[in-house]
Structures are given as C-alpha cells and as structure tokens.
Image (cartoon, rainbow, N blue to C red):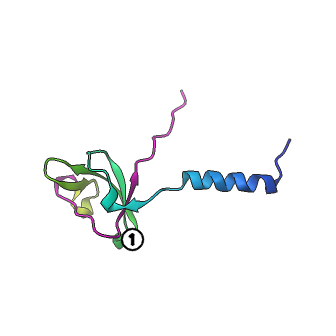
Amino acid sequence: MRIKSMERAPRIEYVRADLAPQWQDIATAPKDGQMILVCLPRIGMLIVRASWNRVHGYWVNDYEGEGGISRPTFYHAGDLWQPMPAPPETST
C-alpha cells in the first residue's frame, strides 16, 4: 500500500526536525575534552572540529587557518556549537 503524499508530509517534517542540527551558543559548549563541531559565522559559516584543552584552558581545533592543533583558538560571541554526529553504521 502506498502512502499518500498528504499523509507522508507530516512524518517527513518530523524526521527533518529530529535530524536538524541543534546549534547552541559557544558559551554552553562542554569543556570536558570531547570533540564538538563549531560554526564560525564571521568566517563564512565555517564549521570546524574542536575540543577544550583542559591543561591550558583554551579551545583547539583542526583548522589551520584558525591556528590548528598547535595554537590556542578563542571563540567569540555569536559562534555556535553542537555535538559531533554519530559515525555512519558500516554494513559488512
């Protein structure tokens, strides 16, 4: 049995809302060393991976233009974060 498009539309919107990134203010980002995604609106909405360096007390990321992993990174008001997505499942 085929689902009519009228019946399918609300389900699609529910799934889209569930999968949509939940960007939050950088001030609320966890500082426990876990890797997160950071969005930088001031640099063309660039998205980088970052983690808090607990020893030195600053963020580090893997974007060389922002200092890379060897220099501290300082995020500003307006920068956003979200948890890293789960890795895709592999089918073997």
Q: Residue furthest front?
A: 28
Secondary structure at badge 1 equals loop
Q: How many marks?
A: 1
Q: Amino acid at mark 1?
A: Gly
The answer to which quarter of the image holds residue 78 is bottom left
Q: Residues within 10 Å of mark 1 (few under 14, many from 20)?
A: few
Which residue position holds label 1? 44
Q: Quadrant of the N terminus?
A: top right
Q: Position of residue 33 (x, y in %)?
A: 26, 45
Pinpoint residue 60: horizontal percent, then vertical percent. 23, 54
Region in magenta: 69-92
| Residue 90 included in the magenta stretch of the image | yes
Quarter of the figure with residue 28: bottom left
- The residue furthest top is 92
Which residue is at 45% across, 46% downward?
85
Q: Is residue 38 above or below residue 33?
A: below
Identify the main secondary structure in magenta. Answer: loop
Q: Nearer the viewer, residue 91 or 82?
A: 82
* 88 horizontally vs 68: left or right: right
Q: Residue furthest right?
A: 1
Q: Position of residue 12 (x, y in %)?
A: 68, 53
Identify the residue at horizontal 34%, vertical 73% (top origin).
42
**Residue drawn where x is 40% and y is 48% of the image:** 84
Q: Residue 74: image x %, image y %?
A: 22, 63
